[in-house]
Image (spheres, grey):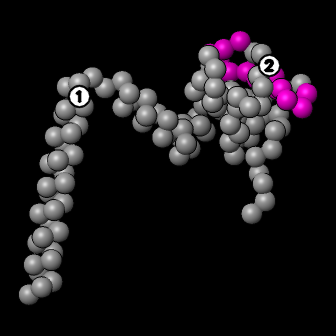
Amino acid sequence: MPFKRYVEIGRVAPVNYGKDYGKLVVIVDVVDQNRALVDAPDMVRGQMNFKRLTLTDIKIDIPHVKNKWENSSWGRKLIVQKRRASLNDFDRFKLMLAKIKRAGVIRHELAKLKKKNAS
């Protein structure tokens, strides 16, 4: 399988280190072998080292970045992580109870199926 994530203009990349950690940026221009000019809606356009960027498969026109990112599996995973990090103690407790209840229902239904297949 050939390598697809080249550094090129329009490539979407989340920042993986520094004060802009987690922000989604688009490569606007390649400055040199180690740096690119990046831009995002919530930050000032500036240079960033390639070591701070994680390239994605998304290469698009700048206005469509956010929508495509939120629909990708990577973007959805980060959204879920942020949502879980923002839970308070009571929400985590309710989530734990819901998981226990769901596991009990699954275990009960599995036992029914096993009993049905055994007889």
Residue 90 as seen in the image, left or right of residue 76:
left
Q: Is there any visible trace of residue 117 in the rendered image?
A: yes
Q: Residue 99: x and y, percent?
A: 21, 46
Q: Is there any visible trace of residue 63 in the rendered image?
A: no
Which of the numbered marks, if any, corresponds to residue 47?
2
For the residue labelled by badge 1, is the local secondary structure a helix, a strand or a loop?
helix
Quadrant in the rendering for residue 67: top right
Callout 1 amino acid: Asp
Q: Residues within 10 Å of mark 2 (few under 14, many from 20)?
A: some
In the image, is residue 37 part of the stretch drawn in magenta? yes
**Residue occupying image coordinates x 71% and y 12%:** 44
Which of the numbered marks, if any, corresponds to residue 24?
none
For the residue labelled by badge 2, is the local secondary structure a helix, a strand or a loop?
strand
Quadrant in the rendering for residue 9: top right
**Residue occupying image coordinates x 66% and y 14%:** 43
Q: Residue 97: x and y, percent?
A: 16, 40
Question: Which callout, 2 or 1, points at the residue further toward the start of the chain?
Answer: 2
Residue 79 as seen in the image, left or right of residue 23:
left
Query: Going by the picture, which residue comes out furthest to the bottom?
Result: 119
Which quarter of the image is occupied by the N terminus? Answer: bottom right
Mark 2–mark 1 distance (CA, rounded to whole Å): 40 Å
Callout 2 amino acid: Gln
Residue 88 as seen in the image, left or right of residue 101:
right
Residue holding disc 1? 91
